[in-house]
Image (tube, rainbow, N blue to C red):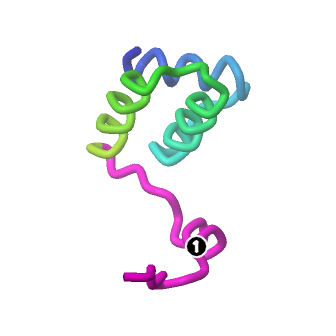
Amino acid sequence: MTIENLIYQFKEEKNFNPSHANDLLDYIQKCYIEEKLSISEYKKLFCELDKMQAEKPLSYFIKTCPYERINLPG
């Protein structure tokens, strides 16, 4: 799948245009979890979105990972 196809699918499902590459990053993660994308498709699209500087907001990491460091037994 290409970025163009991804944008088309996004628009078809959401009924609006993605405003940023971050919207597409969220979308491919959702599609991967729902098994609509294979791991190879996900990785390819992720790399393309990474080049477009897509990223999760800092608040996402604060909410999902409240610990700065986890010490594992040795």
Determine the residue located farthest toward the left in the rendered image.
51
Dot 1: element: loop
Q: Position of residue 46 (x, y in %)?
A: 38, 37
- Residue at 54% x, 17% y is 8
Image position of 64 (left or right of 53): right
Q: Nearer the viewer, residue 68 or 29?
A: 68
Q: Give above or below for 70 relative to 14.
A: below
Q: Quadrant of residue 66?
A: bottom right
In the rendered structure, which segment of residues is drawn in magenta?
52-74
Q: Quadrant of residue 67?
A: bottom right
Q: Position of residue 4 (x, y in %)?
A: 42, 19
Q: Nearer the viewer, residue 2 or 64?
A: 64
User: Was residue 71 drawn as part of the magenta stretch in this picture?
Assistant: yes
Q: How many marks?
A: 1
- Residue at 43% x, 27% y is 39
Quadrant where the C terminus is found in the figure = bottom left
Q: Please give the residue where the numbered disc 1 appears in the rendered image.
A: 65
Q: Position of residue 11 (x, y in %)?
A: 63, 23
Q: Nearer the viewer, residue 10 or 32?
A: 32
- Residue at 31% x, 35% y is 48
User: Was residue 47 drawn as part of the magenta stretch in this picture?
Assistant: no
Q: Position of residue 35 (x, y in %)?
A: 61, 23
Determine the residue located farthest toward the front in the rendered image.
74
Image position of 21 (left or right of 11): left
Q: Nearer the viewer, residue 2 or 44?
A: 44
Image position of 1 (left or right of 13): left
- Residue at 47% x, 21% y is 38
Q: Give above or below for 20 relative to 39.
A: below
Crowding around mark 1 (Cα neighbors within 10 Å: few <14, some 14 to 19, many 20+) is few
Magenta stretch mostly in which secondary structure? loop
- The amino acid at mark 1 is Cys
